[in-house]
Image (spheres, coloured by chain):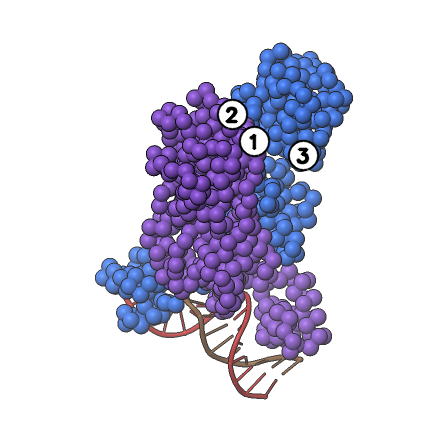
Chain colours: A blue, B purple, C red, D brown
DNA sequence: TTGTATGCGTTATCAA
DNA sequence: TTGATAACGCATACAA
């Protein structure tokens, strides 16, 4: 391993000057600077991040805390999209990204705060963490800047980022209503998740605004799981054959619903219309192609990390950032 | 920040003993050990990774080098699967994972070797890097242990891991032949990629073994891209209407082919049968569901990192590790 | 413009 | 069983 000491020795100057030359300080003569840089290159010098991080007490790294990179959970591509956006942003500012997951935390019994401290990390982007996770609580109460994606919680030094879920789902249901549907059921996700609450609000808003009665029985929870949605949908349409449309709080659940509907010998959209949420890749390839609310997860990840860096640098940020969404009309809704 | 110094002061003992107590050394009395550990907990002590890494000259981190986390490139979920497997393995051995991509490398003009050195990283899992990437060359010639997924190159300290691509594609084409197809075209990926070469070999093997003439015109390259496959397939089936089956070197391309076939007013599998490769999530949801070669990317990532750790620890490893694959019969192939 | 000295938090060597 | 001390590679306050 080549160190600045080696360079100093070879160049016959002090380590200090080498350090400053390598960091392109203004108070080093152009001549020595050039000399040192060429020697460094020649010797294949690589700065040691650990040493830098240790002495500077910070590491130019953004943490991203996720519920987990699960074997099966990635089918919706959402986490991948976010990750991709975060890495892209980090690159633009010469930062690195450190990924930490709940599963890791549980296995190592290591908290998110601990992880960040260990690595001299300045702040974290958080997504998919359950609000009752004690480590999450700890994180919120810490000084660490946090950008929360799709979770609405207030912390000591946090901000939130998401689309306007109420508006988006309202729009989805209004679209169904515009297509003359009245008996519209909703397949929601985990009851406790903040986005579920928001999306349900939008569903109810749309119905009441059109004078349609909200029936509690038309509202079921499927945990954002395809399989659960499949089962719940089967029960639902058997029990309430008058239902002509389904609003699903995620595309994965919509895919389950679609399978259930087909399985009951019904056609989409002729018999039952379906609107999803997220616009995951699968939604475009399903038959029929799924009408859905489109979110840009890449951009979400990108923006989240951009916000985070601002917070780390003590620049002002908005407490709530709303990203754009749009209703993507495809083939799973019919006029009746 | 709480350091071992703080603990030492509070406990009235030396830093040395604190360090050893915290690392559970045998030569510390149970009493002091317990004392120190409780004080550490009480004070919220977190070891500083940078300091550890600096003094130990290693960081308990596995590098994973990918072509990139691209916005659109992740639709196939392959990279996600591998990542997921690697993180899962790393967790079991209490290692961390550092992700580095070509795009980052290009932007920062930083080589893979440099990245690893900077972070005191012991070795890397590599996937999706072009064999003519100069940084890849450098990596191969370095001492760093490397596990290459789906690339067949020899380096100073490397091993390869993949399924048996020749056998797998041979099996796929044999299946087509068993269904009485004779005019079988192949949509291959990038000509230069080693897996493409292997898969092509399998295709040719199967044909010749059955005494079917191999026609150069039946072999087209679509760069593993859905859109390119769409276009090439359209040309192909217009030019050679006698073709009754397509073997695609990836599911994403198969999806493009399917769209092209449908677009020409033909039916799958009645008019043309299609076999894909990879078994990505999309392949199960397409209509018709795609018959394909199934690979377990999660396991591939898991095994790759397991091999890597062995190499880092100077344990013996096989130069070539072949993982299992299987032909997944779904609905895109018909007997003629 | 350059150099000396110090310290970041941790582990390791050696002596007690 | 414990402690004093040096070392890892780097950046910086201060002196020259």
User: In which quadrant of the rendered view does residue B249 lie?
Assistant: top left
**What secondary structure is marked by label 2?**
loop
Dot in front, 1 or 3: 1
Does mark 2 fall on the same chain as mark 3? no
**What secondary structure is marked by label 1?**
loop
Q: Which residue is denoted by mark 3 in the rendering?
A: A227
Choose the circle earlier in sequence order: 2 or 1.
Answer: 2
Mark linked to residue A40: none
Q: Is residue A325 above or below residue A83?
A: above
Q: Position of residue A38 (x, y in %)?
A: 27, 61
Q: CA distance from mark 2 to mark 1?
A: 10 Å
Q: Is residue A238 left or right of residue A2?
A: right
Crowding at mark 3 (Cα within 10 Å: few <14, some 14-19, many 20+): some
Q: Position of residue C8 (x, y in %)?
A: 50, 65
Q: Is residue A319 left or right of residue A43?
A: right
Q: Is residue B165 above or below residue A292?
A: below
User: In which quadrant of the rendered view does residue A218 lie?
Assistant: top right
Q: CA distance from mark 1 to mark 3?
A: 21 Å
Does mark 3 fall on the same chain as mark 1? no
Does mark 1 fall on the same chain as mark 2? yes
Q: Which residue is denoted by mark 2 in the rendering?
A: B270
């Amino acid at each position: 391993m080549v160190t600045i000491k080696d360079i100093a020795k070879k160049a016959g100057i002090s380590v200090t000057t080498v350090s400053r030359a390598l960091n392109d300080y203004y108070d080093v003569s152009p001549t020595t600077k050039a000399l040192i840089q060429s020697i460094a290159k020649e010797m294949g010098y690589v700065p040691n991040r650990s040493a830098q991080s240790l002495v500077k007490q910070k590491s130019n790294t953004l943490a991203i805390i996720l519920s987990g990179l699960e074997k099966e959970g990635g089918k919706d591509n959402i986490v991948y999209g976010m990750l991709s956006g975060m890495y892209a942003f980090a690159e633009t500012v010469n930062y690195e990204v450190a990924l930490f997951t709940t599963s890791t935390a549980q296995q190592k019994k290591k908290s998110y705060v601990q992880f960040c401290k260990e690595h001299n990390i300045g702040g974290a982007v958080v997504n998919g963490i359950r609000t009752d996770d004690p480590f999450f609580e700890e994180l919120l109460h810490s000084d660490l800047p946090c950008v929360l994606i799709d979770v609405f919680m207030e912390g000591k030094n946090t901000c939130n980022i998401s689309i306007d879920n109420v508006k988006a789902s309202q729009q989805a249901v209004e679209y169904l209503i515009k297509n003359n549907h009245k008996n519209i059921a909703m397949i929601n996700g985990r009851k406790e998740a903040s986005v579920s609450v928001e999306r349900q609000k939008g569903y109810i808003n749309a119905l009441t605004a059109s004078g349609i009665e909200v029936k509690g029985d038309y509202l079921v929870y499927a945990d954002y799981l395809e399989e659960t949605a499949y089962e719940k949908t089967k029960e639902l349409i058997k029990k309430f054959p008058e239902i002509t449309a389904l609003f699903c709080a995620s595309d994965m659940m919509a895919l389950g619903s679609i399978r259930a509907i087909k399985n009951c010998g019904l056609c989409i959209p002729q018999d039952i219309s379906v609107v999803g949420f997220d616009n995951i890749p699968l939604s475009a390839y399903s038959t029929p192609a799924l009408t859905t609310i489109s979110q840009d997860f890449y951009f979400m990840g990108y923006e989240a990390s951009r916000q985070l860096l601002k917070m780390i640098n003590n620049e002002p940020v908005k407490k709530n950032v709303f990203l754009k969404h749009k209703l993507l009309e495809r083939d799973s809704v019919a006029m009746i």
